[in-house]
Image (cartoon, rainbow, N blue to C red):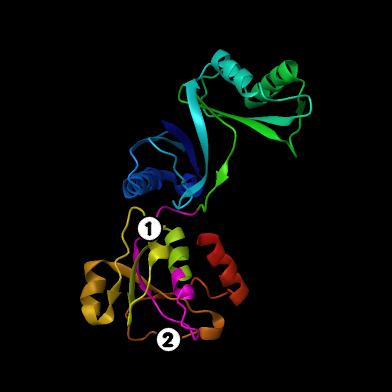
Amino acid sequence: MKTYLLRYGEINLKGKNRPFFERKLSHSLKSYLKNKNVEGSVKRLRNRIYVETADEVDWRPIFGLVNYSPCIKINGNYEAIQEEVKTRCKPFTDKTKFRITTNKMDPSFPLSKQEMNEQLGSLVVEQTGAKVSLKGYDEEIGIEVLQGKAYIYSTMIPCHGGLPVGVEGSALLLMDFDAEGKNEKSLLAGVLAMRRGCAVFPIAEKHHDIQLLDQYAYGTKPQFKLFSEINLPEFIERYELQALIVGDTLSTLKRYDEIPLPVLRPLIGYTEEKIKEEMKRYR
């Protein structure tokens, strides 16, 4: 069984609406597991999500996550944490530089974060002779204490952040080819809108490969349509589409008077170099 501690950031700022955003994120995670044919369970904790899966999973495609850590879950008492730290530091030598990183979100736990860092750090030094180094360290032992359990990890894997897809409504995504016959600007505009919580509905005059959108659309399903296949006003009304997303930059600015929706241009300030850089990030 593989176990993970997943962290989100911007959702914490949503106040009374936060449970809605957390539910959407959990739905995206479950949809992702189903798509990957991986059995698993998703449990919401306080400001965290704990996942158990049958196989190893890369969580980076899920918008809304800031980072995640493969971890183990143990009893949240100091003695159990001590024993796990002793086990983890066994490979350390007197040449190892390490740090202890504690995050305590359980008010019933008797020690502060600083006390935990100091006491566990001293324990590792005593056991191995390794040296504490808050920067430029070789090894990290991370501990998060919440809801009576301790989650121990050694690494944080960064994700794309943003918001779960679908929390900010739905939008029409106009797919278009540029002068070189590429659709990267349209794809990137769609991905950036999804990262801000939009569910996208791609549409175009000709067929487009939308595989990149599918890679990040968990919890929603971008179904590509040709203009010739639909009645546009009815399509907009049926799916409650609130905006039109296009891949325009300042050098390719167009009008879209034939589509009765507010126009969003996520790439309006992007240079060609920036677009290529961003596409590498999401591919």
Magenta stretch in the rendered image: 162-187
The residue depicted at 65 percent of the width and 32 percent of the height is 140
Q: Residue 217 — which label?
A: 1
Q: Is residue 218 magenta?
A: no
Q: Nearer the viewer, residue 73 or 261?
A: 73
Q: How many marks?
A: 2
User: To which quarter of the image does residue 259 belong?
Assistant: bottom left
What secondary structure is marked by label 1?
Answer: loop
Up-down relation of residue 149 to residue 65 (above or below): above
Up-down relation of residue 219 to residue 73 (above or below): below
Looking at the rendering, in which quadrant would you find the N terminus?
Answer: top left
Q: What's the amino acid at mark 1?
A: Ala
Q: Nearer the viewer, residue 182 or 69?
A: 182
Q: Magenta region's main secondary structure?
A: loop
Q: Position of residue 153 (x, y in %)?
A: 56, 31
Task: For label 1, count other residues whose C-alpha is less than 10 Å away and answer few (under 14), some (14-19) or many (20+).
Answer: many
Q: What's the amino acid at mark 2?
A: Arg
Alpha carbon separation for disc pair 1 and 2: 27 Å
| Residue position marked by numbered label 2 in the rendering | 255
The residue depicted at 59 percent of the width and 76 percent of the height is 272
Please indicate, yes or no, whether residue 190 appears anywhere in the rendered image. yes
Q: Is residue 167 magenta?
A: yes
Q: Position of residue 82 (x, y in %)?
A: 60, 17
- Circle 1 or circle 2, nearest the eye: 1
Please indicate, yes or no, whether residue 196 appears anywhere in the rendered image. no
Task: For label 2, count other residues whose C-alpha is less than 10 Å away and answer few (under 14), some (14-19) or many (20+).
Answer: few
User: To which quarter of the image does residue 255 belong?
Assistant: bottom left
Callout 1 touching callout 2 (CB < 8 Å): no
The residue depicted at 39 percent of the width and 76 percent of the height is 175
